[in-house]
Image (cartoon, helix red, strand yellow):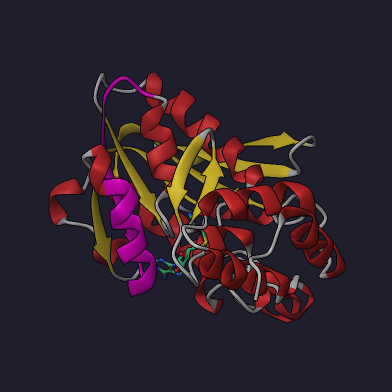
């Protein structure tokens, strides 16, 4: 069979519903080492796999982040969380201690420390596949990745030392998982999406545990939805953090920031 050519690939991707068929086609062509690789990649994308899983990387905050099959693809909106975390970290100690909890690929932590002159990065996730992927991104920037449930994964030596604790935890209410596009629903791990009945189960635990790990003057930053912001703020207040909300309509992103008292 002759190797697929770009116009045919674009037609196929467009028919499969890819909005950015031309751009995606070019990326698939550029990434393929052989015509057989290219044909397989086009098949995968046309069958609905996220482009980032097919390519093996995602562009995030101006960086190329390795993404393994099944691992959560970092979203553009999460760049607001990165910007806020980097801003808070830059006013902390000269070598801020940054922890990326629920790290997935590690994209958030890597992007935060990329914006700083110096930082100590630690990342953790409960999913072994995500942890393996995060090591590919976090180790090259000198960080450490741990596997386990939220704070259980972190070394005791970090208690009371964390300047910036950042978490893009799952926050989709269980009943809404079925409404997500198939790229997320089918190709990303359920544990990466499902936030429980009201979507806030993991975020509440993150907020409750944060004061034990934050340094004096440290901050917890989480992404949430606009609808969940009020309850997220309440969870922060209950745990003794002083919360504020940052909203970007342009990115449809909401971040709650809590300062340790
Ligand atoms: C929405 S994804 C975000 C991943 C990454 N922070 C990002 O923005 O690309 C949520 C991540 O939280 C992890 N996770 C879910 N529950 C967890 C828990 N109890 N402890 C640690 N990680 C958890 C999932 O495995 C998944 O990688």
List x then y, in percent, for residue 161: 22, 39
Q: Is residue 119 above or below residue 174?
A: above
Quadrant of the rendered structure where residue 16 is? bottom right
In the current view of this chain or complex, which residue is farthest to the front? 2
- In this orientation, which residue lies closer to the viewer: 167 or 256? 167
List x then y, in percent, for residue 38: 58, 64
- In this orientation, which residue lies closer to the viewer: 176 or 211? 176
Q: Is residue 252 left or right of residue 144?
A: right
In the current view of this chain or complex, which residue is farthest to the left? 157
Q: Is residue 164 above or below residue 132?
A: above
- In this orientation, which residue lies closer to the viewer: 111 or 80? 111
For the question of whether residue 51 can be seen, the reply is: yes
Quadrant of the rendered structure where residue 136 is? bottom left
List x then y, in percent, for residue 255: 61, 42
Q: Is residue 93 left or right of residue 221?
A: left
- In this orientation, which residue lies closer to the viewer: 53 or 8? 8
Q: Residue at x 50, y 66 (%)?
A: 202
Q: Is residue 118 magenta?
A: yes
Q: Is residue 186 above or below residue 24?
A: below
What segment carries the magenta color?
116-138
Quadrant of the rendered structure where residue 132 is? bottom left
For the question of whether residue 173 can be seen, the reply is: no
Q: Is residue 102 left or right of residue 50?
A: left
Q: Residue at x 28, y 56 (%)?
A: 135
Quarter of the N terminus within the rendering? bottom right
List x then y, in percent, for residue 86: 45, 28
How many labels, in total?
0
Quarter of the C terminus within the rendering? top left
Q: Residue at x 60, y 53 (%)?
A: 29
Q: Residue at x 55, y 64 (%)?
A: 35
Q: Is residue 183 magenta?
A: no
């Amino acid at each position: 069979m002759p190797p697929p050519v770009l116009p045919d690939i674009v037609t196929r991707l467009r028919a499969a519903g890819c909005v950015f068929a031309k751009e995606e086609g070019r990326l698939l062509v550029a990434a393929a080492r052989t015509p057989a690789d290219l044909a397989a990649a086009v098949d995968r994308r046309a069958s609905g796999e996220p482009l980032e899983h097919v390519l093996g990387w995602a562009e995030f905050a101006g960086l190329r982040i390795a993404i393994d099959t099944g691992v959560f693809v970092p979203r553009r909106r999460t760049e607001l969380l990165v910007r806020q975390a980097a801003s808070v970290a830059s006013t902390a100690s000269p070598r801020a201690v940054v922890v990326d909890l629920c790290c997935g690929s590690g994209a958030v932590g890597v992007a935060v420390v990329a914006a700083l002159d110096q930082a100590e990065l630690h990342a953790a996730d409960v999913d072994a596949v995500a942890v393996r992927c995060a090591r590919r991104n976090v180790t090259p920037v000198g960080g450490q990745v741990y596997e386990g449930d939220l704070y259980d994964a972190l070394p005791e030596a970090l208690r009371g030392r964390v300047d910036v604790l950042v978490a893009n935890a799952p926050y989709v209410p269980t009943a809404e998982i079925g409404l997500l596009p198939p790229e997320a629903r089918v190709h990303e791990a359920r544990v990466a999406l499902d936030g429980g009945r009201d979507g806030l189960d993991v975020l509440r635990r993150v907020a409750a545990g944060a004061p034990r790990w934050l340094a004096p003057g440290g901050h917890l930053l989480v992404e949430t939805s606009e609808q969940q912001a009020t309850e997220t703020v309440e969870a922060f207040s209950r745990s003794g953090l002083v919360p504020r909300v940052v909203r970007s309509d342009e990115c449809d992103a909401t971040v709650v920031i809590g300062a340790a008292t």
